[in-house]
Amino acid sequence: MTQLDPDQFAPLVRHDNEPVFDELWQAEALGLAFSLAERGVFSPAEWSRTLGSEHRGLLGGGAADTTRTYYEAVVKAVERLLREKGPLTVDVVERRVSNWRQAYMNTPHGQPVRLEAAYYDESEK
């Protein structure tokens, strides 16, 4: 496995050179992209092209050029590359997305969302 330079996946930066993560999911999405590239699911060049394409698409569709739009593009790029190059089928990905949504709905406000919560209702405990 080749070592990747994390700077190839660097998000927008603040003046103090710290990554801009307004919400935890943003860091997780970027971390997932880095991890998938590190494992060879896609190359940094493929990542860069796909992220740029998704970001331009959002901006062209009228989205404001904000940090949130950038990270929405990150998620869209990861999803697209997984569909195109990943070992998972669309059905598997859609089922997992559905499970995460159900886990979110079953998790009390302020608690961490865990995938296991998709299979039971926290309020029944």
Image (cartoon, rainbow, N blue to C red):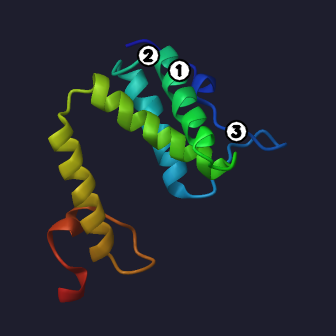
Foreground of the two, 104 or 4: 104
Image mark for residue 43: 2
Q: Quadrant of residue 70?
A: top right
| Element class at badge 2 | loop
Q: Whole-percent x and y of residue 94? A: 22, 48
CA distance separating discs 1 and 2: 10 Å
Q: Quadrant of residue 17?
A: top right
Label located before the other in sequence (3 or 1): 3
Q: Amino acid at mark 1?
A: Arg
Foreground of the two, 29 or 48: 48
Q: Quadrant of the C terminus?
A: bottom left
Q: Amino acid at mark 2?
A: Ser
Q: Amino acid at mark 3?
A: Leu
CA distance separating discs 3 and 2: 20 Å
Left or right of 58? Residue 98 is: left
Label 1 sits on residue: 49
Label 3 sits on residue: 12
